[in-house]
Image: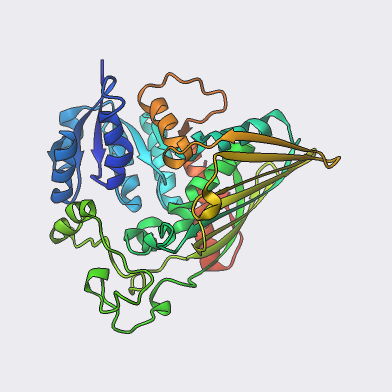
């Protein structure tokens, strides 16, 4: 018998990551029942694509459709509202990352899950990438001994000659701290979860720094810059000028009159208040440490990971845009204390999120893959990942080292 799913949020993520894959890959085991969104135009777009029944009331959708689970894909700040309400109504939940954006909402989710006995799944697709899976295997096997420290840096490119991924966050709702928790939460939740999972530890204390070096109102190059790219008089000279695709116009621009959300907003507008350059230091409960950096103004996109242990050091890197990204393999190097190097060469997976999406989706909708490494993530994983980012934000705001135990009871 097929499992039935409802959606809270008719977003691009809802369709591109979940609904489209249900329709083209998992239709034998899953079906789409209903969709709720505050924007009726986007609900109608989603329904045309998927056949979902449209609801203008979340409770009514859940109680009418009685799905096996609801998939939450709204703006980040609202994740907790629908997660909590669905569990209170007696339903399991699958949520897009991040689980939520701050410690207070995190606590409410954990308390509700415990009180209701319902199940919350957080979809961390990066865990399922072949290269990260191999790193997890190596660390778990003791290849570098007891882990002492981790260095992890992630770069997002700003140039539209490449992908302009970093700049894209500043055009959209993600650029408002109150909606997304900034990139320390919205983006880095992936990265913090990876490290937590790989080293099998939980964060204890966080200190952080953040700057707005490129985007936001203080970096505005023209006083008369338009509120959106399409309305701006500096289209020909702005490196961040963006033209929406036909699909984006259909989904967003044609539905602006419902909620005012504009997908091509100026990266220098007044409401932009998230950091574009940030660093954090984390002390784990087991004594391990993490030094982390995220830069959304970089020349190319990719990451570098270094893990130091009692028996050696692991190094891995992935360049995702630019000339260095053209290759067929990923390489993980393990250095022992006698200066010997062991290389693990993996065929490069070109699937979405480095091949992580297809493995996650099979686990999610079919559940027939063995999981000896604990890829599948729940509420505690979601909490430990967002708490690093949320408390990094608090550290920047207060200038203090923040202790997790002072903020939430896990």
Task: Please give left or right for residue 15 compared with residue 46 in the image.
Answer: right
Residue 30 visible here: yes
* Picture quadrant where residue 167 is located: bottom left
Scheme of colours in the image: rainbow
Q: Looking at the image, is 398 positioned above or below residue 379?
A: below
Q: Looking at the image, is 155 positioned above or below residue 287?
A: below
Q: How many marks?
A: 0
Q: State the residue in front, 112 or 204.
A: 204
Task: Please give left or right for residue 329 compared with residue 102 in the image.
Answer: right
Q: Residue furthest top?
A: 1
- Residue displayed at 45% across by 41% down: 353
Residue 73 visible here: no
Q: Position of residue 371 (x, y in %)?
A: 52, 23
* Picture quadrant where residue 401 is located: bottom right
* Picture quadrant where residue 198 is located: top right
Q: Residue furthest right?
A: 338
- Residue displayed at 39% across by 44% down: 108
Q: State the residue in front, 108 or 237.
A: 237
Q: Quadrant of the N terminus?
A: top left
Q: Position of residue 221 (x, y in %)?
A: 39, 81
Q: State the residue in front, 11 or 134.
A: 134
């Amino acid at each position: 018998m097929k499992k039935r799913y409802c959606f809270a949020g008719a977003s691009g993520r809802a369709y591109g990551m979940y609904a489209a894959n249900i329709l083209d890959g998992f239709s034998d085991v899953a079906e789409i029942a209903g969709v709720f969104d505050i924007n009726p135009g986007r609900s109608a777009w989603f329904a045309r694509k998927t056949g979902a029944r449209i609801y203008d009331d979340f409770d009514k959708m859940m109680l009418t459709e009685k799905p096996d689970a609801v998939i939450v894909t709204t703006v980040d700040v609202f994740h907790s509202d629908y997660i909590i309400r669905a569990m209170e109504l007696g339903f399991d939940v699958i949520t897009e990352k991040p689980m939520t954006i701050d410690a207070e909402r995190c606590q409410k989710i954990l308390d509700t899950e415990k009180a209701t006995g319902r199940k919350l799944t957080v979809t961390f697709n990066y865990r399922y990438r072949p290269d990260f899976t191999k790193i997890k295997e190596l660390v778990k096997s003791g290849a570098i001994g007891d882990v002492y420290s981790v260095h992890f840096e992630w770069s997002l490119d700003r140039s539209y000659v490449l992908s302009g991924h970093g700049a894209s966050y500043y055009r959209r709702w993600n650029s408002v701290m109150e909606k997304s928790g900034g990139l320390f939460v919205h983006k880095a939740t992936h990265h913090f979860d990876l490290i937590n999972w790989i080293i099998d530890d939980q964060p204890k204390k966080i200190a952080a720094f953040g700057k707005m070096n490129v985007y936001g109102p203080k970096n505005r190059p023209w006083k008369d810059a338009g509120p959106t790219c399409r309305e701006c008089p500096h289209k020909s000279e702005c490196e961040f000028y963006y033209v929406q695709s036909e699909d984006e116009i259909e989904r967003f621009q044609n539905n602006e009159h419902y909620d005012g959300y504009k997908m091509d907003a100026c990266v220098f507008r007044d409401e932009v208040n998230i950091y574009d350059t940030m660093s954090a230091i984390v002390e784990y409960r087991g004594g391990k440490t993490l030094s982390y950096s995220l830069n959304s103004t970089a020349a190319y996109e990719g990451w570098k990971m270094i893990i130091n242990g009692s028996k050696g050091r692991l190094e891995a890197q992935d360049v995702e845009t630019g000339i260095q990204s053209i290759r067929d393999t990923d390489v993980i190097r393990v250095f022992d204390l006698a200066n010997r190097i062991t290389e693990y060469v993996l065929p490069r997976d070109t699937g979405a999120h480095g091949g992580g999406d297809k493995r996650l989706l099979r686990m999610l909708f079919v559940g027939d893959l063995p999981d000896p490494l604990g890829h599948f993530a729940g509420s505690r994983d979601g909490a430990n990942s967002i708490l690093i980012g949320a408390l990094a934000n608090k550290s920047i705001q207060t200038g203090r080292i923040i202790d997790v135990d002072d903020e939430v009871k896990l």
